Amino acid sequence: MEKSIQTDTLTRDQPHPRLEFDAIERAIKYLRSGPNVSQPIDWELRRTAERFASITQFGNLAVHSTVRNRSARLTTYIGSPAVQQPDPNPSQQAILKRLPDTLARMEHYLRQAPFVRVDRTMGDNGHFAPDCTLFVSVQRPEMIRLAYMTWSTLFPPRTDGRRVGPAQTMIYIPEWMESERQMLVFPEINATVALGSDYYGESKKGFLRLMMWNAKQRGMLGLHAGSKILSVKDRDGRPRRYGMLIFGMSGTGKTTHTCHLHGLTGDGEGIEILQDDVVMLGQDGSAIGTERGFYLKTEGLDPVSQPIIYKAATSRNAIFENVMINHEGRLDFEDEVLTSNGRGIMMREDLEPYISGSIDLPPAADLDGLIVAFITRRHTIVPLAAKLTPEQAAACFMLGESIETYAGDPKPAGESNREVGT
């Protein structure tokens, strides 16, 4: 594992990170060869997940979790001062204080419980595509769905034997005590531990977070943004191709706008969908893609307003999470009795014919321009629709003008959030 940053400086009450790194590395080493760890092949994952899921009227899967949003306030970064949170909340402080005991108990537990291993790749290019390994406990057998959802979202491992990205690992124990739910992030050794949550968003965020960290070490910038290419004709009828980056907080419309035609349906005009959530921006204006499965919010999903998304979401390949399904297997996207954070994974391939042949946005020099759009939801400063100067765009990126949604943290949902650019 890569260790590029010194970890001998301590701040606050965080334990010496080297000791915690050793515990995580021992755990990963054991899980890679432990007798209680199985590695099902692709079709076995789908078949086993089907046993613990409902089958919808579209023939795809619907599952429900006990935890229905990411545990942002219980997510703690461990390592050198370069990665530590500057102002941990009381819950994070308590997690840090208990950390040695927590990891000791985790090491004991993972030698007893049954685990499933999934190997995938994040990104689809020849120079930066992290290897992602998920170890998920199936002490609750239905947690096989977390392995299947991760398998669906990411790309297959490289078959040419050429490693082009760092190895990122996630240990997932959903049945950990609810009173001790916590997400432990170790950026400097590329590892994440999720304890006490069965929400798929923790797996997705876990690998994306580490990729964003690794991209930054390589001179790139991880963006919470979708990407696409627009083919248009100018006033003189000449064809033009523009790249587009679409920023937005979780659950505010990145997938919707990434998969929107913008009225470009004429001869020689159209869109090419690249990514819907996270990309890595290079200094040349290019943006590396990350995933093959798009994680959409299902509220308001219908075939009229979102025809491209609806077609992909009703494919047999889709997976729904925490969406109301009745006894006959019929989904109701408007019923929010259980949660307002209903989700689904749809395959990028099911967005045909609107997908690009690559998930990566080309360098700016290869396009006629790059459009950067910000989805703002507060509208106290930035109007509903505005064309910004470069200086205004920089301010919008830094200050933001959005709202917190149930997807990120349900307690302050609807409140102002000034982080739309991160």
Image (cartoon, grey):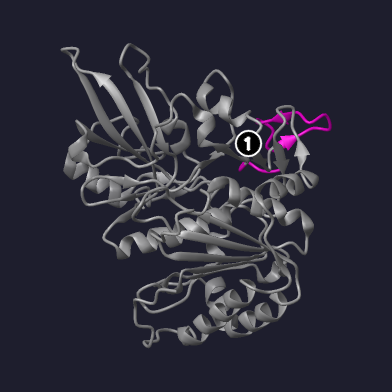
Q: Pick whichever, 297 or 338, lies toward us.
A: 297
Give residue 277's position: percent from left, percent from top.
44, 44
Residue 411 visible within the image: no
Instruction: Tell me the magenta residue range.
Output: 324-341
Position of 113 relative to 287 (above/below) = below
Residue at horizontal 20%, vertical 36%?
366
Position of 235 relative to 105 (above/below) = above
Position of 345 relative to 26 (above/below) = above
Give residue 398's position: percent from left, percent from top.
29, 52
Q: Pick whichever, 144 or 33, lies toward us.
A: 33
User: Is residue 249 left or right of 346 when viewed as pictured?
Assistant: left
Give residue 138's position: percent from left, percent from top.
74, 61
Residue at horizontal 53%, vertical 77%?
93
Give residue 300's position: percent from left, percent from top.
58, 29
**Which residue is disc 1 drawn over?**
318
Neighbourhood count class around disc 1 (C-alpha, 10 Å): few under 14, some 14–19, many 20 upward: many
Amino acid type, residue under disc 1 in the picture = Ala
Q: Quadrant of residue 134?
A: bottom right
Residue at horizontal 37%, vertical 22%?
262
| Placement of the N terminus among the 4 image quadrants | bottom left
Q: Pick whichever, 376 or 149, lies toward us.
A: 149
Residue at horizontal 66%, vertical 60%?
197
Residue 340 belongs to magenta span: yes
User: Is residue 188 left or right of 344 when viewed as pictured?
Assistant: left
Q: Classify mark 1: helix, strand or loop.
A: loop
Q: Quadrant of residue 4?
A: bottom left
User: Is residue 62 left or right of 95 when viewed as pictured?
Assistant: right
User: Is residue 151 left or right of 77 when viewed as pictured?
Assistant: right
Residue that lies at the very extreme toward the front in this rendered image:
160
Residue that lies at the very extreme toward the right in this rendered image:
327
